Image: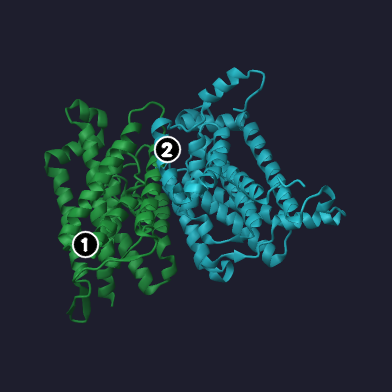
Chain colours: A cyan, B green
Amino acid sequence: MLDFINPYYLQIGSFILINILLAVSVYVPLSSGQLSLGSAGFMGIGAYTSALLTINFDLPIFLGVLAGACLAGILGIIVGLPSLRLTGVYLAIATLGLGEVIRVIFVNWESLTRGSIGLTGVPQIGRELLNLVRGFGFEPSMIGLKNNQFVFLLVFILLFLIVLATIWFVVRQQNSRVGRSFSSIQMDEKAAESMGINIMYFKVLSFAQGAFLAGLAGALFAHVMGYISPSDFSYHRAVEILIFTVFGGSEVIIGSVFGAIFLTLMPELLRFVSEYRYIIYGIMLVILMAVRPQGILDIHLLGRFKGIKRSKGGMR
Amino acid sequence: MLLEQLINGITLGSIYAIVALGFTLVFGVLGIINMAHGEIFMVGAFVGVMTTGVLGWPLWLAFAASIVVTSILGYLLERMTLRPLRGKKGVSHLAPLISTIGVSILLENLSHHIFGAGNKPFRTEFAEISIEIGQVTVYIVQIVIFAISIILMIGLSIWLSKTKAGKALRATAENLETASILGVDTKKIITLTVIIASAMGGIAGILVGMAFNSVSPQMGLAIGLKGLAIIILGGMGNVKGAMVGGLLLGLSETFLVAYGDSGYRDAIAFIMIILILLLRPQGIFGSKMAEGR
């Protein structure tokens, strides 16, 4: 019964949701004109912080995740402040460098991180949740689910709620004074400054928000996977995250969401040509940039959608 | 010991410098970062391995083959990925970055597919020959690498400053529109730039193969990232900066491995650029901060 709740699909679903968080973590700094390639590094900080706290100090997962995200956010502020001097590609390479430095530290600080072997036995969110509901006297079999089905389902639902809350927050923020400040800084920094917008505050704010989200996603990743190693947070990951956002359309948040969903699913769908899938992936990126450099979704396209179904208030 | 490390450092540094020159040329003229440069370099190295190892060609022919292959790659890169994006309305500075990342993913996985994942040895007839000067051992390979790098750098400098094409290239780098008004065929110059940069990548690939005696599909990324770090260090689009930055990085890496913690070797480049970006964002030789593109 209820066989359609397939752990494999739910697992992919969970990865999609984590990737959406990561894509949004690039989108937010980008909405104030800052291209950050440090998400993989911040993600690593979040993952390792949460994993180490829960393994070594038996901290509840919830607190560990929060601590991981906050530490990443704080690091974002520390890095964001001096990075104000940098723009465009300079910032991109500096943040890329930051991510690499963080990864190398993970590899070399063996007494704490166990080096390139990575951390195993990170407490898993699903099992914790299962114990929690069992504490209330609830058994998965009561609704006709197997244990592992139920666990994956719970994780998926939890991540879904977190992603929903994040997107809700970002959209709300976008339509507020803060969001308008972000986009005015993106359009023209000097003009924004002369209009009385505190550039330093808002740029650091958006950068730190991105770092926080990446840290959050990293911490969740650690507790979903149960195993992390420095190679999870390498250059490849940073590029992958950037591509989610740019592929989907970096002007609108729904673009990041779409990019994360599509590009996480695609390698799975291309499994039948698995040997060639990254080759196809590369070609696809080149073609997309030549045909539609602003990404799949942009404001005009969404506007057209909105025109068709006027009754539904679309997301901006 | 010290002198030997110095020689090792200079050898490594001069290879880094050539890689960085490829980045710096493209950035100087087009204002974009060619993320595929590292992979073009890797393809050049594989051409070297295949021609010397499998076909048994002499080294100079391997160089020629590598230059030809990487030049073709450079031309294709410009024609298929960079040109479609140029002069198009509403193209952000992200587009060429992503597009070249696409090419790098393609090339890395393609060579993974063709050559396999492991390291390939790079055999040259004089790999093990060394000469002793006092207590210092110098390998012939190191001298060859150093000589080729110096010739390349001097050649490029002379070409850029003295020849007509070099002047046209610099004019295009200065201002594309003005150069084209003044009669420079900017389209041709841009294509030429990407081709030269790629060919230098190919040469650097063979040099690295000779220096480390191993070539793998993943090497493009590692060296490519270091090349990026070097052009930041030396100043974007600055030829002299790329050379000095390369030597600086090569020396500091070698000395760290010799006298410090070798685990942090790959982080040095980035610690250096984070420092330089905070202290002097325009790089060592950069004149002023370029507009962020």
Q: Is residue A190 left or right of residue A177?
A: left
Position of residue A279 measured from the top left corner of the image (x, y, whole percent): 41, 47
Return the chain for callout 1. B
- Residue A157, placed above or below residue B168: below
Counting from the top left corner in percent of width and height, residue A66 is at 68, 52
Residue occupied by mark 1: B55
Query: Residue flagged by tag 1: what amino acid is it?
Result: Leu
For this orientation, the residue located farthest to the right is: A137
SS state under label 1? loop
Q: Is residue B286 left or right of residue B166?
A: right
Residues at marks 2 and 1, CA–CA distance in whole angstroms? 41 Å
Q: In this orientation, does residue B14 appear?
A: no
- Give the residue displayed 52% in from the left and 24% down from the top: A301
Query: Which sits in the foreground, B60 or A213?
Result: B60
Q: Is residue B76 visible?
A: yes
Answer with the quarter of the image where residue B211 lies.
Answer: bottom left
**Residues packed near mark 1 inside 10 Å, few (<14), some (14 to 19) or many (20 plus):** few
Say whether mark 1 and mark 2 are on the same chain: yes
Determine the residue positioned at 64% across, 47% down: A9
CA neighbours of label 2 inside 10 A, class few (<14), some (14 to 19), many (20+): many
The residue beneath circle 2 is B94
- In this rendered view, identify the residue nearer to me: A224 or B7: A224
